[in-house]
Every structure is written in C-alpha cells, then in structure tokens.
Image (cartoon, rainbow, N blue to C red):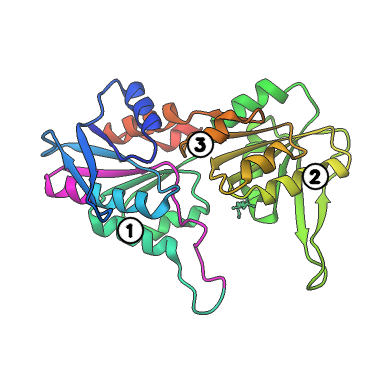
Amino acid sequence: MKLMAGNSNLPLARAIAGYLEIPLTDASVRRFADEEIFIEIHENVRGEDVFLVQSTSFPANDNLMELLIGIDALRRASARRITAVIPYFGYARQDRKPGPRTPISAKLVANLITEAGANRVLSVDLHAGQIQGFFDIPTDNLYAAPVMAADILARYGDKDLMVVSPDVGGVVRARALAKRLDNAPLAIVDKRRERPGESEVMNIIGDVKGRACVLIDDIVDSGGTLCNAAQALMDAGARSVAAYITHGVLSGGAVARVDNSALTELVITDTILPTDATMDSQRIRVLTVAPLIGEAVRRIADESSVSSLFD
Ligand code: R5P
C-alpha cells in the first residue's frame, strides 16, 4: 500500500500516514510560469495499491486539477489500484439542476475523477448520499458522526441535550447523530420567506426551552445558515447553542461571523485545512478525522468491511 498526498491538506495526509505507520510517497508538485500544475512521483509505484489524499477545497479548481493530474501520473506509472481519498468533496452542493439551463457540476467532477483513472473513491460526509451514485466506481462515504458523538457526549452529555438540524434538508443527518447520542430529542429550524421581498422567518419545530442545543450540519460556508439558526434558537429560549459541522469551508467573513454569533462554540473537523483565522478563533475547535480515514484506508487495502466502522 502507498499513501500519496496532494497539497490541499498535508497535515491531514501526514496524520493518516502516521496512523497507518507508513511514509508518504515521495512526490513533488510544481507550477509552470503560467500556473499549469506538474506532478512527479519520485519512487516506484508499479503494481501498488495507492491512496491519493486531496480535498477539493479552496482554491477548489486548483485542488481539483491537482487531484486529476495526480491520478493521471499514478495511472501512467502503472499503479495497480488508485483510490482518490477526498475528505472534502467540493462541488457537492451542485448535485441537481436548481433551474433551467444550469449544470450538475458534482456529476461532472465525478466523471472527471473516474476518467482520469481513479478506481475507487473515499470521502467523508458527502453533501448528499446519492452523490455516491454519480461515480460508476466503488465509492465509500465515511461519517464523522462517531468522532462528533464522542465529543458531544463528553461535553454536553450531562446537560439537557437537544440535537437540531439548521434546515429541513439536514434532518436525516441530524437524526442519525441523535441516535448515537442515546436517542437525544431532535428539533428542526424551518427557514421560510412568507412573502417575496420579506425577510426570512425562522420557525423552530420542537420545544428548545432550557435545552443545550447542538446544531448538526455537513458544511459551514458563509456561516449564515448556522449563525441565524443559533440566534433563532436562543430567541426561542435555548440555554446554549453549540454546532458540530464536518466541513469548515468558512469562506469570506465566516470566522468573524461565528465569533460574533450566539454560538458558544463551533466544532469542525480537519477534512479541510483550517486557516490561520480559524485556528486563532476562540470559538472554533477542530476534531481530527485522520484515524477514521486511516482505518478505512487500512480496511480497503485489506479488502475488509468499511461499513462495520459505523456499527
Ligand atoms: C446546505 O444544504 C448545507 O448543508 C449548509 O447548510 C450550507 O452549505 C451552509 O452554507 P452557509 O454557511 O453559507 O449558510
């Protein structure tokens, strides 16, 4: 087995390598003057089972291109099997046509990865489970839920806990996590614009009065969904609101928005390399998914069950 890393999240790749007790494959990524990407693998990978770790996070297009070129380099170097390990699969939110004459970019990206030569894909908390079906190659979708559940129980287990989905679309994910938290009760934030041009109304489905609320989501990008939901919960009488969100995209002024929000804390994972602003925030904490991904890689290499990781 070989583990190779792109540049999107080297600390995570190194931590996965540490878990597996193997070195990262010696490879270099260079840029031509016009920013074209060039990858060179400095050791033999012929006949090897290779796992290439690369999140397609910001800058999404550069990181995606680096992933595709890395896969191509491995294929032309005669790797036996190439698994694209994509802890954060960017473009996932474009998984359907929101209107006429719009693309389904998640499907296009899946096609590109397959066409480049990947034999398998391994990702974490895909935005929608059906994205697995966009790939015509085996695709494992890991869940950060066990990592989060352990932390939530340690921090909030003795409080009057309530799991909350920040929108109707996230209910399945929130319910799955609530199940791991001794079947904690579930509330839903229902965001509605009653009439065009009027501001959004946040209806809370469920009684959150006096509860320690934990918001669950897959992505925090601008932080708008999250911070508005936190405020609506506090207005509805919640005792406190924390958030556990797998992918900390945190673009633009998101960190400042979180720092000035009603949240007591935001907990993300390291599927995306945290920025300096994120690391400096007093309200944001990062959990690692390196052992989870490392164990899944080990099981794929051993041809043993990955789903049993979540039993
Ligand atoms: C949407 O379906 C996702 O699950 C997130 O709720 C969304 O991407 C968060 O975006 P933002 O932080 O920009 O509100």
Q: Residue at x 82, y 50 (%)?
A: 204
Residue 254 seen anywhere in this rendered image of the structure: yes
Query: Of label 3 and label 2, which has the lower sequence position?
Result: 2
Q: Residue at x 66, y 40 (%)?
A: 256
As for residue 79 lying within the magenta part, the answer is: yes
Check disc 1 and report the residue beneath it.
136
Q: Residue 99 sits in which quadrant?
A: bottom right
Q: Residue at x 20, y 36 (%)?
A: 27
Check disc 3 and report the residue beneath it.
275
Check disc 2 and report the residue beneath it.
231
Query: Of label 1 and label 3, which has the lower sequence position?
Result: 1
The amino acid type of the residue labelled 3 equals Thr
Name the element at disc 2: helix
The amino acid type of the residue labelled 1 equals Asp
Magenta residues span 71-98
* Front residue of this view, candidates 204 and 248: 248
